[in-house]
Amino acid sequence: MKKQAIGFIDSGVGGLTVVKEAIRQLPNESIYYVGDTARCPYGPRPEEQILAFTWQMTQFLLSKDIKMLVIACNTATAAALEDIKRKLAIPVIGVILPGSRSAIKSTRNNRIGIIGTEGTIKSDQYKKMIHSKDTKSIVTSLACPKFVPLVESNAYNNAIAKKVIAETLRPLKNMNLDTLILGCTHYPLLRPIIQNVMGDKVKLIDSGAETVNEVSTILDYFNLAVDSRDNKETEYKFYTTGSVQMFESIASQWLEIEKATVEHIKLGL
Amino acid sequence: MKKQAIGFIDSGVGGLTVVKEAIRQLPNESIYYVGDTARCPYGPRPEEQILAFTWQMTQFLLSKDIKMLVIACNTATAAALEDIKRKLAIPVIGVILPGSRSAIKSTRNNRIGIIGTEGTIKSDQYKKMIHSKDTKSIVTSLACPKFVPLVESNAYNNAIAKKVIAETLRPLKNMNLDTLILGCTHYPLLRPIIQNVMGDKVKLIDSGAETVNEVSTILDYFNLAVDSRDNKETEYKFYTTGSVQMFESIASQWLEIEKATVEHIKLGL
């Protein structure tokens, strides 16, 4: 059981920001990843469809015998975490709770902002989660539907990206936020631009990186972590429903590995 | 279930350093605490006796219907966590794993020191835990049997304490450590002196504070956290097998609460 991989799923390449942190914090663990690039973005889709797609990714990874599932996508977490967690025998965690917890710890003036896809923002789960732990904070949400397509098209660092991000975030500029949750795992790839637009005083919370702490705690709690003294080779496998080349390019760049091994798969047939 | 208290147990007042962090990070949770002050220190005792004493504290709190148990004592964690976790239906966590994980994250030069009681150091659990996750780090352990009595006698900030601590830690001074685990929950009360002796460049890891992050994750994972929107009053109750007055004095001072409500109990009769 311990030697099996941890499964990560996302609507596209965004969950790689979580994987990057997992490789750093959990160097003994093998990772299997599914990015449903062909049907990305999930944000504007109806909730039932997101639930169905998320189950398809989950079933694919279950067939690869994973020991734990990380829903490394805020939109899918909002739509599907509760259902999947209830129905699977292996541990399942999402990205919304760790991000919420970290924002509450970070804020000093009790003004927290959240940016995410339409699906995530419409679900209102960040606000609900934060208020379940902390009734003092004023929480402001903003949907940023243009951000995921920027990342998925590998255009996340050019002049157009900068302009789109500055315009989108304008409504948050004068709200006196001291903490902003990047409530979509794609957004850390836009982090330098977002930080620049929001200013240095706003602390950005990377929901994915926070999630890896939780993955580590849960692995240990259930005695599922690989023991480094076992000298096991780790294995990283990436599956995409879209272009292998595009995925490889973003994954190699972002994960700083020489060449990510990416395989094309079909889901939901 | 959610409204029940979280139970904390320790050989004496040390676990209050964990409680202080729990009050900060989990303000909606009620806390019941047992300090076995009359039989403190646990460090020099045989393992079977520590196991038996830890079970007695656990049984007492189970009779108060706690929803989760935190073994807020490194010596008791080393001797009893595995056994108690296996036998109880509620979640049980200790302080060694969170401290180990945090030290691995912190170190840059892979030289980690651990200070603790004789029992904790003899068990070698920190070293084993760290090496199960990270074979690169060189781990140096030192038993500090004089530290707990300093704290329990409320003499943790005087000239004698400073002298004892400087002498005890001398063997660690030239080992080029960049991270030192305070592997006993009493030690954060000695933190300023320890930091002063070790120098500013050594990062001190408070195993108890790290544990509270884990408490929060596990509460959420099992859906046991109190919802702040329920407007429930939190309740803090402290039980000691020793002097109520001494316990009250340290608890009020350390937790910065006006007057801790402390009750005397007898265990193991």
Image (cartoon, coloured by chain):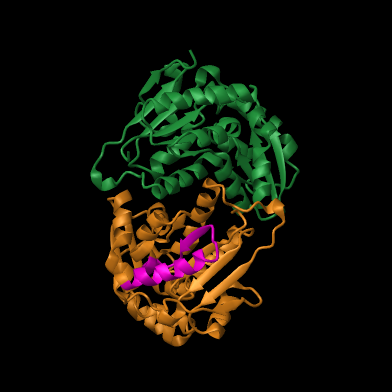
Chain colours: A green, B orange
Query: Residue A156, percent across and down?
Result: 55, 27
Front one among A98 and A24: A98
Residue B123: quarter of image: bottom left
Q: Is residue B116 visible?
A: no
Query: Residue B94, percent across and down?
Result: 42, 60
The C terminus of chain B: image quadrant: bottom left
Q: Is residue A170 visible?
A: yes
Name the residue rendered at 47%, 61% in the picture: B70
Query: Residue B79, percent across and down?
Result: 34, 65
Query: Residue B230, percent across and down?
Result: 70, 53
Name the residue rendered at 50%, 33% in the picture: A87
Q: Which residues are magenta?
A: B49-76
Residue A5 vertical position relative to residue B24 in the rendered view, above or below: above
Name the residue rendered at 60%, 58% in the picture: B26
Q: Is residue B230 magenta?
A: no
- Name the residue at the top extreme: A269
Q: What secondary structure predominates along the stretch shown in magenta?
A: helix
Front one among A19 and A169: A19
